[in-house]
Image (cartoon, helix red, strand yellow):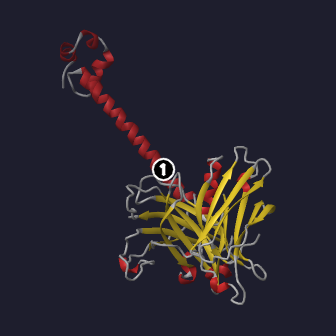
Amino acid sequence: MPTVDEIKAANSENLANNDFLVNLALTFNVVNIPLAIFILILVCIACILFVVLVIFIVRSCIRRKFIPKSKRRPIKSIYLDEIPGAIPGQVEGQHGTLEYSLEYQLTKQQLNVGVIQANDLELRPGVEHLDPYASVSLLKVQGEKARVFGKVNKTAVRKNSTSPNWQQTFAYQIPESELKCIVAVFEVFDYDSIGQDICIGHLDVPLKEVDEGEYAGQILERTGWLKGGEPMMEGIGELCIGLCCNHSGSQIDVTIYEARQLTVADQLSTKRQSSVFVHLVLKHKKKRMGHYDTKPKPELINPYFNERHTFTLKSGTLDDCVLLCKLKSNSGRKKTLGHTQLGVDATSSTGAKHWEEMIKGPGKTHVFWHILSVGSEDS
C-alpha cells in the first residue's frame, strides 16, 4: 500500500494539496490520483445501475401481485400445413401469416378481437416496400346471406415493414347465442397516401369452427395463412365513385361514373327488359340529408352512368356523414341488388379511406372503386 508521501510525490502540487484526493488514492490503493478519481466514477455508476435494477425488480413484483392480468392460453406447437387458411394448390406462406387473438367476456357479452402481428408479407411486383395496416370486420352469416356486423376497425400503419407488429384489440358487443354465426374477417392492406389501398391478403375465421371454451373468459392466440385475392365480401361487382367537397365543408359533389363486372342478371326478371340505376342517400347521424337517383341503364354488366349530384350540408357535419350507394333494378319494386357505404365509420376500409381522402384534399375530385356488397342496407 502506498504512503501519503509517495502519493504526494507522484502527483502535481494542486492534487497533492487536496487531502480528500490523497485519502481517495489511499482507499483505492493507487498512487495516481486521476486513476483514483476514475475508479470512483466507475463505482458511482455501478451503484446507480444497481439501484435502478432493484427498483425495476420491485416494480415488476408489485405489478404481478396487485394488478390482475388476463389469463393467456399458451400457443400449441403446430406444423406449417396445420395453419388455418392454407389453400390446396397454392404455395403456403406466399402471402404471409397473421397472428390474431380472440377473447369472449361472458359478463359483458363482448368479443375482443386482437391483431397481433403479420409475418413475411408479400411484396407486389414493382413495389420496393410496404406500409401495411390491418382491418377487422365481423360478418354475421345466416343461411346463404352474410352482412357486416358492427364497425370495421383499422390498426395503425407500420412504415416500411413486411413483418409489422400491431398489438391492437377491438371490442364488439355480441350475444353469446350469436357467436356461431360470426365470421371474423382480417384484411391486410398496403397504405397508399395518394390512392386506393391495395389488399395484400385476408384471413377468414368462422367462430363455429373454434371451440368456444378456448376463448370464453380467456385469450386464445392463433396464427393463420393469409389468402390472396378478394375477401369473403367480394359482392356482385364494383362501382366507380368520385367525391369532392368544398373548402368550407358545406357541399359534397358525388359523381357516379360506372359499374363493372356486375353479376345481377340472375336477380332480374326475364319477362321484361331490365335496367339498373344508382340510388344515393346522404345521412348525418341517421337523419337523411338528401337523396338522388341516376338515370336507369339497360346495360347489366358494365353500365356507364357519368352523373354528378351536389349535396348541401350544415356547417361542421361533414365528418359524421355517411353516403349510402345502392344499385337497384328499375322494374317492379325496384329491388336493391347491391350496396356500398362511404364515410369515416363506413363498413368497408375503402369507404372510410375514400371519405378521409376527400376531407384531406378539398376542391379535388377523389375517385375510387368500391365493392358492391350483396343485398340491401338499412337507410
Would you say residue 178 is visible in this rendering? yes
Q: Quadrant of residue 173?
A: bottom right
Q: Position of residue 282 (x, y in %)?
A: 75, 61
Q: Quadrant of residue 15?
A: top left
Q: Quadrant of the C terminus?
A: bottom right
Local packing at callout 1 (Cα closer than 10 Å; few below 14, some 14-19, many 20+) is: few
Q: Position of residue 337 (x, y in %)?
A: 68, 78
Would you say residue 345 is visible in this rendering? no
The residue located at (52%, 64%) in the rendering is 115
Q: Position of residue 150 (x, y in %)?
A: 67, 69
Q: How many marks?
A: 1
The residue located at (41%, 45%) in the rendering is 53
The residue closer to the viewer here, 277 or 82, is: 277
The residue located at (63%, 74%) in the rendering is 373
Q: Position of residue 374 (x, y in %)?
A: 64, 77
Q: Quadrant of the N terminus?
A: top left
Identify the residue position indicated by label 1 in the image: 58
The residue closer to the viewer here, 368 or 316, is: 368
Q: Where 264 falls versus 325 (above or below)? A: below
Q: Amino acid at mark 1?
A: Val
